[in-house]
C-alpha cells in the first residue's frame, strides 16, 4: 500500500510539473505575441499617418530654402517663396546658420516627419494613460487629474496624499524644465540626448514597481519626470499638445461649424485650416488607438502590466525620439527672431 501511494504521489507531482512547464511556455509565447502585436500596431499607425500626405490638394514647393525664402511659424511647415528685402551680410550669415538643417529637406519630408512624430506620441500616450490609471490610479502624462485629487485630499486632511500628488506635479515640472534646458543648449542634439534618459526612467519605474509590489510613490515620480520631457517634445518640436484632446476637438468642431453653418457664412477652408484639421485628427486617432490597444493588452495579458509595460513603452518612446530627430524634422520650429514657439489659446498649434 505504501509503495502504491508513493507511486501515485510521484505520478501526480510529475503531471503537475508538466502542467506548470506548459503554462510557462504558453505565457512566454503570449508575451512574445503581445510585443509583436504592439510593434505591428505601432508601425501600422505610422503608415496610416503617412498616407495623409497623398490627399493634399496641391504639392508644396520643393525648391531648397535660401536666405531669401522663409518658413512660416503656423501650424504646419509651409514654405514661402516671396522674396524679402535685402539684408546685411551679418543677418544673412545668421539666417544661413539658423536654417542650415532645413536647407536640404523638402517641405513634404518635414510634414511627414511631423505626422510620424505626433502619431507615435499620441498612440503611446493613450496607452500610457490606461496603464497608469489601471496600475497606479494616478496620472503622469497630465497634471489636471493629480491637481483635482490633491484638492480632494487637502479637503479631507489626508496630508500624505497631498504630498504624494504634489510630488508628481513638481516632478513633471522638473522634466519639462530639463528638456527645455537641453532644447535651448543642445538644439539639434536635444532629442538624441534626452531619448535614452527618458527610456531609463521608464525602465527604472517598471523595475521598482515589480520589485516592491504595491508601492507607487517613487515609480510615479520617475514616470512624471519622463513624461514631462516627452510631452515637451510634442509642444516644442511637434508644435502641438499630443497628450490632451480637448483643444483638438474644439478646433475641429469650430472648423466644421464654420464650414457648413449658414450663420457662420459657410467659410471655405484654407490650406492652413486643412493642415490643422489633419494634425488634430492624427492626434485624436492615435490617442484612441493607443487606449484601445492598452485595454486589449490588459485583458489578454494581465501579467504584462505588472512588469514589462512601461519598459516596452519607454523603449518605444526612445526609439521614436531618436528616429524623428530634429535633423529629420528640420529647423522650421524656430521663428526668424530665434524665439521658441508658444502654444495658441486652444492648446493645439505652435505659434
Image: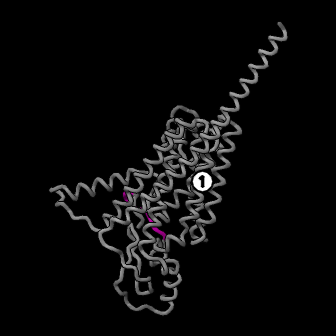
Q: Quadrant of residue 261?
A: bottom left
Answer whether residue 287 is magenta in the image. Answer: no
Can see residue 150? no
Give how far across and how far down residue 201 sits, in percent.
Answer: 65, 52
Identify the residue shown where x is 31% and y is 55%. 252
Residue located beneath label 1 in the image:
226
Query: 31 or 285: which is nearer to us?
Result: 31
Give how far across and how far down residue 13 sits, in percent.
Answer: 76, 22
Give how far across and how far down residue 250 sits, in percent.
Answer: 33, 53
Identify the residue shown where x is 44% and y is 60%. 240
The outermost residue toward the top is 1
Pointer 1 local density, CA inside 10 Å: few below 14, some 14–19, many at least 20: many
Answer whether residue 344 is magenta in the image. Answer: yes
Give how far across and how far down residue 85 sits, in percent.
Answer: 37, 89
220 versus 156 height, above or below: below
Can see residue 232? yes
The N terminus - image quarter: top right
168 versus 93 height, above or below: above
Dominant SS of magenta comes to loop
First to last magenta residue range = 340-346
Query: 89 or 148: which is nearer to us?
Result: 89
Total residue callouts: 1
Identify the residue shown where x is 44% and y is 62%. 115
Indicate the secondary structure of the residue bearing disc 1: helix
Amino acid at each position: 500500500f505504501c509503495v502504491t501511494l508513493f507511486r501515485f504521489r510521484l505520478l501526480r507531482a510529475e503531471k503537475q510539473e508538466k502542467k506548470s512547464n506548459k503554462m510557462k511556455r504558453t505565457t512566454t509565447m503570449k508575451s512574445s505575441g503581445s510585443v509583436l502585436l504592439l510593434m505591428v500596431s505601432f508601425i501600422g499607425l505610422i503608415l496610416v499617418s503617412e498616407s495623409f500626405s497623398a490627399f493634399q490638394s496641391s504639392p508644396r514647393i520643393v525648391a531648397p530654402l535660401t536666405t531669401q525664402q522663409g518658413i512660416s511659424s503656423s501650424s504646419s511647415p509651409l514654405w514661402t517663396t516671396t522674396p524679402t528685402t535685402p539684408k546685411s551680410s551679418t543677418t544673412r550669415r545668421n539666417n544661413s546658420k539658423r536654417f542650415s538643417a532645413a536647407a536640404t529637406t523638402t517641405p513634404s519630408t518635414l510634414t511627414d516627419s511631423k505626422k510620424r512624430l505626433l502619431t507615435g506620441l499620441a498612440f503611446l500616450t493613450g496607452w500610457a494613460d490606461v496603464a497608469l490609471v489601471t496600475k497606479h490610479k494616478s496620472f503622469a502624462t497630465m497634471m489636471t487629474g493629480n491637481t483635482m485629487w490633491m484638492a480632494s485630499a487637502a479637503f479631507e486632511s489626508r496630508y500624505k496624499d497631498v504630498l504624494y500628488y504634489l510630488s508628481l506635479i513638481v516632478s513633471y515640472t522638473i522634466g519639462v524644465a530639463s528638456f527645455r534646458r537641453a532644447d535651448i543648449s543642445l538644439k539639434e542634439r536635444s532629442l538624441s540626448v534626452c531619448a535614452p534618459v527618458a527610456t531609463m526612467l521608464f525602465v527604472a519605474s517598471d523595475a521598482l514597481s515589480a520589485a516592491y509590489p504595491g508601492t507607487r510613490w517613487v515609480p510615479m515620480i520617475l514616470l512624471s519626470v519622463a513624461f514631462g520631457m516627452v510631452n515637451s517634445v510634442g509642444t516644442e518640436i511637434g508644435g502641438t499638445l499630443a497628450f490632451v484632446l480637448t483643444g483638438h476637438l474644439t478646433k475641429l468642431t469650430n472648423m466644421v461649424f464654420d464650414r457648413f453653418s449658414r450663420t457662420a457664412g459657410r467659410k471655405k477652408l484654407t490650406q492652413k485650416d486643412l493642415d490643422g484639421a489633419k494634425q488634430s485628427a492624427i492626434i485624436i486617432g492615435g490617442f484612441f488607438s493607443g487606449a484601445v490597444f492598452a485595454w486589449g493588452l490588459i485583458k489578454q495579458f494581465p501579467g504584462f502590466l505588472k512588469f514589462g509595460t512601461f519598459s516596452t513603452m519607454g523603449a518605444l518612446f526612445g526609439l521614436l525620439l531618436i528616429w524623428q530627430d530634429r535633423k529629420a524634422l528640420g529647423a522650421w520650429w524656430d521663428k526668424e527672431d530665434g524665439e521658441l514657439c508658444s502654444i495658441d489659446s486652444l492648446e493645439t498649434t505652435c505659434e
